[in-house]
Image (cartoon, coloured by chain):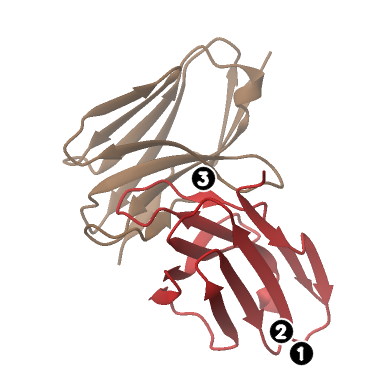
Amino acid sequence: DTAVSQTPKYLVTQMGNDKSIKCEQNLGHDTMYWYKQDSKKFLKIMFSYNNKELIINETVPNRFSPKSPDKAHLNLHINSLELGDSAVYFCASSPGTSGDEQFFGPGTRLTVL
Amino acid sequence: SQKIEQNSEALNIQEGKTATLTCNYTNYSPAYLQWYRQDPGRGPVFLLLIRENEKEKRKERLKVTFDTTLKQSLFHITASQPADSATYLCALEAGYNTDKLIFGTGTRLQVFP
């Protein structure tokens, strides 16, 4: 019955590697997001997709590439991982209308060594 | 650029008292503002939304005010309980009638029995 799920929950990897985080929502929402929460707990939007179309693309290094195969899935692929990429990454979804609440996943804690 | 400040990094109060958290913003006029609760190791959970034409919104023991002149929102929890201990995040709509949110840094609330 999980509304927004992410895998994996934890990801530990070496600098320079490429990794992916997967997100799925079963709420029937049109919009999905990726957020990054740093060590100071600051939560910042990275990307959003509406019906598989990229809507928001913040100033994020192009090593980060989101992919939405369908409106229930939004994956995040990260190339050439750097130490500064260590953070908790949250996926979220919303119906897509302005002001709608956003439903967050449990987060993926990425640690780059 | 848009800036949001939650001016108490941590707030400690006794059970039964009212907790008041503050969210101040500068440099723009959001159409709405949301409050979220985040527990350790979990994603944020939506609590309340208040729009620019609303002064106050209530939900059970929660009350939110929105003063667009002062550019401030206050979040109150009455009859606070230890189970209310969490980090509370305010989030502002970043561009008129969009679903892009800018989050504040959060206030960690600790309610002592």
> Where is mark 3, residue-wise?
B106
Horizontal and vertical percent position of residue B95: 26, 62
Give the side of residue B80 with respect to residue B98, left or right: right
Residue A57 visible somewhere in the drawing = no
Instruction: Tell which subunit mark 1 falls on.
Output: A
Horizontal and vertical percent position of residue A2: 66, 47
> Where is mark 1, residue-wise?
A16
The answer as to whether the residues below labels 3 and 2 share one chain is no
* Amino acid on which disc 3 is placed: Gly
Query: What is the C-alpha distance between the residues marked 1 and 2?
Result: 5 Å
> Where is mark 2, residue-wise?
A81
Residue B22 visible somewhere in the drawing = yes
Local packing at callout 2 (Cα closer than 10 Å; few below 14, some 14-19, many 20+) is: many
Q: Which mark is residue A38?
A: none
Query: Closer to the N terminus: mark 1 or mark 2?
Result: 1
Q: Name the residue nearer the viewer: B70 or B92.
A: B92
Which chain can be seen in brown? B
Check contact, mark 1 vs mark 2: CB within 8 A.
Answer: yes
Give the side of residue A34 with respect to residue A55, left or right: right
Give the side of residue B81 with respect to residue A57, left or right: right
* Amino acid on which disc 1 is placed: Gly
